[in-house]
Image: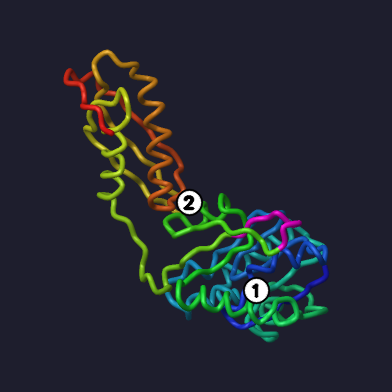
Amino acid sequence: MKVTGLSGKSGTGKSYVAAELSSKLGIDAIIDDGLLIAGRQIVAGESAKKQKTKIGAVKTAVFQNEKNAEEMRFALAKLSPEHILILGTSEDMVKLIAERLGLPEPEEIIHIEDVTSEKERAIARKSRSEAGMHTIPAPTFQVKKKFSGYLIDPKRAFSKKENKTKTVIRPTYSYLGAYEISDKIIVQIVEHVVSITPGCGQLLFATCINGNDGLYIRAIIMAEKGSDMMAAARTLQRRVARAVSHMTSFNILGVEVELRGYIRTAKKNII
């Protein structure tokens, strides 16, 4: 297995250019802040960007936790990439990650200054320091499963030829502070969607379960008298999933709608 490193100070855009660099160099997999990314998929790992403190983030990024390191070694053995790119804030960090994972010493360590301009690095530093924005070289769908509840935004790569997306997140130790949404807010969103969905008369009860991979929502409703109950329920499922995902950035695992009968009073039209 060939190992290449990409070194650069925090916030200089390493993750942003990693996918494009990998494509140019024929690299199969990327290790970035505790994650193993291959084939545009998050294969394994726990992201340092999810940690609540910078110290915790560094420990996760260098696989200081033996359990995390062992899980990553197993994933790498199973994947068996021919060429892997390790991202680090310094050459020593790149070498430490390789050592912790039992990988060969990097044959080459590329510095971020060699592959980006000063202007690009300045933009990256500004995004990190002022907006708390971090990039993961994986599609939004993959990132949402790992970062349910984080502010997520897909970004295009530098090169139009690559036509690949990278995903920006704001982690919990950013300037925003802890990003949490109470169950009450989710219920209020569901209640609003019920009120504007044809055929849905009244929300009786709503609850949600937030797991590591996303959010599961359950709603009990009364349908409008004379409406197609099943059609209304299916429409409500789609609308609730779309609304909660859009407003909160949670990955929606499922929406269950239980019908308890008809309500006689039809709702007013809402414009």
User: Which mark, residue 14?
Assistant: 1
Residue at 57% across, 66% down:
135
Query: Which corner quadrant holds the N terminus?
Result: bottom right
Q: Which residues are magenta?
A: 159-166
At numbered mark 2, what does the secondary structure look like: helix, strand or loop?
loop
Looking at the image, is 118 positioned above or below residue 176? below
User: Dot 2, crowdedness within 10 Å: few (<14), some or many (≥20)?
Assistant: some
User: Foreground mark, 1 or 2?
Assistant: 1
Quarter of image, res 61: bottom right
* Horizontal and vertical percent position of residue 152: 49, 58
Residue at 56% across, 56% down:
154
* Horizontal and vertical percent position of residue 98: 71, 76
Residue at 34% across, 16% down:
228
The amino acid on which the numbered mark 2 sits, given as a three-letter code, is Asp
- Estimate the spatial distance between the alpha carbons at disc 1 and disc 2, rounded to whole Å: 26 Å
Residue at 37% across, 20% down:
230
Query: Which corner quadrant holds the C terminus?
Result: top left
Q: Is residue 97 left or right of residue 199?
A: right
Residue at mark 2: 213
At numbered mark 1, what does the secondary structure look like: helix, strand or loop?
helix
Looking at the image, is 247 positioned above or below residue 167? above
